[in-house]
Every structure is written in C-alpha cells, then in structure tokens.
Image (cartoon, rainbow, N blue to C red):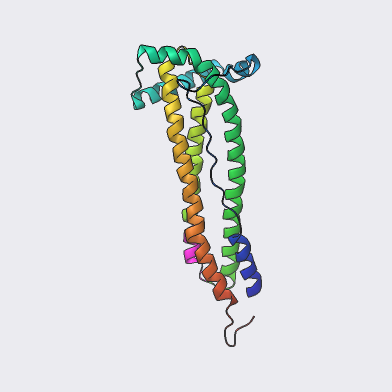
Amino acid sequence: MKRILALGISAVLMMPVFSMATVLAEDASTNVTTTPTTTTAKTETETSADDTASIQARVEKRKAELKVKLAAAEKLKIQTKCKAAQGLVSSVKGRVQGIETSRTEVYTNIVNRLTDLSEKLKNKGADTTALDSDITALQAKITTFNTDLATYKQSVSDLAAMDCKTDPDGFKASLLAARTSLDAVNKDSQAVKAYVNDTIKPLLKTIRAALETPKTGGSQ
C-alpha cells in the first residue's frame, strides 16, 4: 500500500501547471489597421436594451475610476479606428473562453488529485495537516484567478459590444481596465504555478520519501 501511495504522489508531481497565455486586443488609438467583416460586427454588437444599460453602467464606472477624459484629437482618433478594434476584440473573446475552459480543467484536476491523495494518506494514518492546508491555500489562489479572469472577460465583452464612436472616453477606459485585468490574471496564474511547484511539490516529495523508506518491523 505504501508503494501504491508513493506512485500516486509521483503522478501528482508530474502533473503540468501551465502559464497563462497573454491575450489582449490591439489599442484602438495606435495599432488598428484592419476592418472587421459586417457579419462579425453585427453579431457582436447586437444587444438588448437591458444589456446596453448594463454595459453603459460599467463603462461609466470605469471612466470615473480611471479618470479618463480624452483630448479632442485622441477622441477623433479612437472614433475613426475603434470599430476595427472591436473586430479584433471579438476574436479575443473566443480565445479567452478557450483559455478559461482549459485552465478550469487543469486546476480542477490538480485539486481533485491532491484531495484524493490526501484522503488516501489520511486513511493510512499519515498526518496530512500540512498538505490539507496547502490545498486550501491553492484553492484560494485559483478562486482569485477565476475572479480576475471573469473581470477581464467582462471588460473584453464590453469593449466588443459598446458604442465606441459615441463614447470614445468609455472605450479607452474599458481598454485600460482590460489591460489591468489581464495583468492581474497573468500574475494569478504565475502565483498558482509557483505555489504548486515551490510549496506543494516539495511537500509531496518529502511524503513520498517517507513512504518509500522501510521501517523496521513495519508492513511494506
């Protein structure tokens, strides 16, 4: 049984923890040169009255928080190019959804494997206090990641759906908010990866070594 548990620990140790891919729309005021197709623009911008009101409320909040008030020249520049930018943002939305799906699967798998391993160790009489504490801390970091990713997704969605020509200040504020949220998501992802690699994996190696060390008179 000790050998089986040691092999189970080894399997967890080999599980990969991926880095967050950096995904961000191009800045409407500087880099957009392409124009989205009519079909894509229509699909992404068709919203209900309630949706529009919700988007506007979030945009107004971002403008107030970031104190965005553009000069006339920059407003005109954004109004000229923001529709093309929204085409790029629409493609980002799909990529973010894909990252969310794959990351949720990876993180869920890691936590489930660790939880299952802890239960098996506990049933064999092992002290899993440190491991259980680490699992709880890891779950908290994953929750932070999920929260910040949801904020980023909302910012990107609002960028794609808002009336950017009417409200260039709001478009700029939402773009800045998306960048800030993306930075947070990347930091969260690295924090999860570092915690697994630097805290949990060393602990599992110690537990595995103890399981593999024969004890005089003990069962194998």
Q: What is the magenta range? A: 127-135
Residue 80 percent coordinates (x, y) = 48, 12
Residue 87 percent coordinates (x, y) = 57, 21
Q: Is residue 13 above or below residue 168?
A: below
Left or right, residue 101 beside residue 149: right
Look at the image and tell me in which quarter the N terminus lies: bottom right
Residue at image point 47% right, 65% down? 130
Residue at image point 63% right, 14% down? 38
Look at the image and tell me in which quarter the C terminus lies: bottom right
Q: Main secondary structure of the magenta part?
A: helix
Residue 208, image quadrant:
bottom right
Magenta-colored stretch includes residue 129 = yes
Magenta-colored stretch includes residue 20 = no
- Let me know if residue 124 appears in the view: yes
Residue 215, image quadrant:
bottom right
Q: Name the one closer to the observer, 91 or 51.
A: 91
Residue at image point 38% right, 12% down? 73
